[in-house]
Amino acid sequence: MKSTKKSPEPRPDKSQTLLRQLATVPAKLFSGAFRQQYGALCFRYSNGGPQVEILVVTSRESGRWIIPKGWPMKGKKPFEAAAIEAWEEAGVRGAVRKKPVGYYTYLKELENGDVAPCIVDVFQVEVTEIRGDFKEQGQRVLEWVSPDEAARRIREIELKSLLVEFQPRGRKKGNGGA
């Protein structure tokens, strides 16, 4: 006996929609129109040992796993903007390195529905303070995970590589932004 119940329609993959949209305007990818963002690769040493844990957060719109990131801020250096994003999106502060540990690219869906290719410079933040009261509290899920688990959760291929290969630079505990 066949069931009369309809199987649910598969939900469209939003990333495929973005790729199709970009395919109609390839000039956007090759016109030098990449937008700059700054990200924070927040980490801590687990149980005071040599192993690190990386902080991943969910995006507010889609709920996918990301690292804290945002747009340039007037009057702030790139590493300062990354540190501010870590505080606003995840309630963490710490020693931030002034030079990026890497970068990745992704497609950002803008509020008007357009798609912008973005390049994100990623700055290392050794977390020394975690607070429960921060700007975007309740809008995101935060989890501390191993670098491998962080890479499994993240969608962007270049960021996955950064996470898997991540080795903290500078001295353990309080490198002072060296």
Image (cartoon, helix red, strand yellow):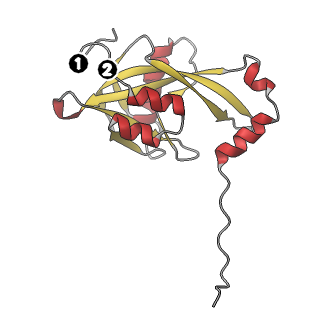
The crowd level at tag 1 (other Cα within 10 Å; few <14, some 14-19, many 20+) is few
Q: Quadrant of the C terminus?
A: top left
- Measuring from the top left, give residue 117's x and y in whole percent: 67, 27
Label 2 packing within 10 angstroms: few (<14), some (14-19), many (20+): some
Q: Amino acid at mark 2?
A: Pro
* Circle 1 SS class: loop
Position of residue 72 in the picture relative to residue 141 (left or right): right
Q: Which residue is mark 1?
A: 172
Q: As displayed, is residue 152 above or below residue 11?
A: above
Q: Position of residue 94 (x, y in %)?
A: 32, 22
Q: Say which quadrant the N terminus sits in.
A: bottom right
Where does residue 3 sit, x and y in percent of width and height?
64, 85
Q: Which mark is residue 56?
A: none
Task: Please state which amino acid type lies under the numbered disc 1.
Answer: Lys
**Callout 2 touching callout 1 (CB < 8 Å):** yes
Say which element carries label 2.
Answer: loop
Q: Nearer the viewer, residue 131 or 145?
A: 145
Which residue appears at 38% of the width and 14% of the height? 97
CA gap, disc 2 and disc 1: 8 Å
Residue ID at (70%, 29%):
116
Farthest left residue? 48
Label 2 sits on residue: 168
Name the residue located 46 percent from the left edge and 29 percent from the top edge. 161
